[in-house]
Amino acid sequence: MEAGTVFLSLVLILLTARVLGEAAAWLKVPPVMGEMLAGIILGPSLLGWVELNEVIQTLAEIGLILLLFEVGLDTDLSRLVKTGRKASAVALGGFVAPLVTGFALSYWLFDLSLLLSLFIGGTLTATSIGVTVRVLRDLKRHKSQEAQVVIAAAVFDDILGVVLLALLYEFSLYGGISLINAGKVLIFIAVFMLLAPIVAKVMADTIGRYNRRSKIAGLIPTTIVTLVMFFAWLAHMVGAPALLGGFAAGLALSRRFFLPFAAALVQSDGAFVRRIGASMRPIIQLFTPIFFVVVGLSLNLQAVDWTSPAVFWMSICFILLAMGSKLAGAFLIEETTHFRWAVGLSMMPRAEVGLIFAELGRLSGVFDNDIYAVMIITIAATTILPPFMLKWFYGRFGHHLTEKEL
């Protein structure tokens, strides 16, 4: 693709995202909805002015990684650990329920093949932590206790999703599954999540010491972006989602991160952490809208056969199942009803994670046009509707959750 085309695409993406994001905020709607709408308008669904390509997809992925870095930077690790049991229950319930029910509905009710039914169930397990975190931030709930549960559960959900995706891809290629390969992926991810924050913390303290001696402006944003990208690459190399690298780096830099066995090496510096946040915020605010626009660009609503009764009824069934199964996971924890509803609604968005499953199904020849259209409709509905539902829920019942603030 010519450089001029990329530049023009970025002009359209950034300008339209800003205008529609501002309009959404003015209408008291989460700005992320305006940014995703920008992608739908600019992409193949309507105008077709912007074509999704590797350059834009890479910039979008950087935006998602930086967004998760910011989430990690604002996260209190001790409180995140305290949510471990609840988050695990939410993640496992929200993963197993859509996988099993999606497979059962596809295989026995719609009489689809075994592999196709597994892919559909896998697609329904997805949770988009990027969309969820942005909506909670827009609603000023990103530091609440339910948000901590959602963040931990979504990270766990992403890990499970990667393993399932690897298994389904292997199944589609070879007609069988290697549990040894799946075990290796899990071990690599576990080791990464244990060691990466420690290494990142030591590296960040080294950056802090050199920052006091630097004669050139911009050392903090340059080195921190380098650190984040390095850990994103490292996560990718061990088979984990790249966004987990950004989250691990942010978590390690948090002033609430504590290493009891390395206290002599690593000292928390709250002022330095605040400087990191202030230096990185403009970069994060530049890249993250690109990610949400790309979510809209990825949805080709014109490819849907809206006149097909089968597509219509299958879409309705899968949308209801996708939403209900995520709520089921939230209702496994022992909490108030309002707390569980908040967690369940926050776990619903699919967005980029669901699209990865759907695209793999299409590229491997498992999904035909009609099934692919059904999955796109399901992903679109479960990406667009939950932010509005969360907005309404917190406006109506948010006062019941004030005592759960951290």
Image: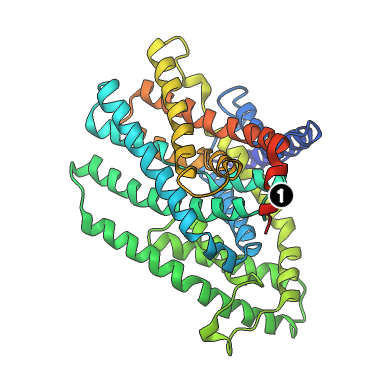
Colour pattern of the rendering: rainbow
Residue 68 located left or right of residue 157: right
Q: Quadrant of the C terminus?
A: bottom right
Residue 122 shows up from this direction? no
Q: Residues within 10 Å of mark 1 (few under 14, many from 20)?
A: few
Q: Is residue 99 visible?
A: yes
Which residue lies at the image location 51% right of the left edge and 85% below the top edge?
Answer: 261
Q: Amino acid at mark 1?
A: Thr
Q: Residue furthest bottom?
A: 264
Above or below: residue 218 compared with residue 92:
below
* Disc 1: which residue: 402
> x and y percent of residue 372 in the render?
39, 27
**In the picture, residue 48 is in which quadrant?**
top right
Position in image of residue 294 (x %, y %)? 58, 39
Nearest the viewer among 159 and 285 is 159
Q: Is residue 239 above or below residue 371?
A: below
Measured from the top left, where is residue 123 in percent x and y? 40, 37
In front of the other: 328 or 303: 328
Vertical relation: 279 (above or below) 263: above
What secondary structure is found at the residue carrying circle 1?
helix
Of the 4 image quadrants, the one containing the N terminus is top right
Residue at position x 71%, y 49% from top?
402
User: What residue is rendered at 41% in x and 45% in y?
Assistant: 93
Residue 28 placement, left or right of 105: right
Residue 245 image offset from top left, x and y in percent? 51, 62
Quick check: 130 left or right of 286?
Answer: left
Q: Residue at x 60, y 62 (%)?
A: 72
Up-down relation of residue 41 to residue 282 (above or below): above
In this rendering, would 186 be left or right of 287?
left
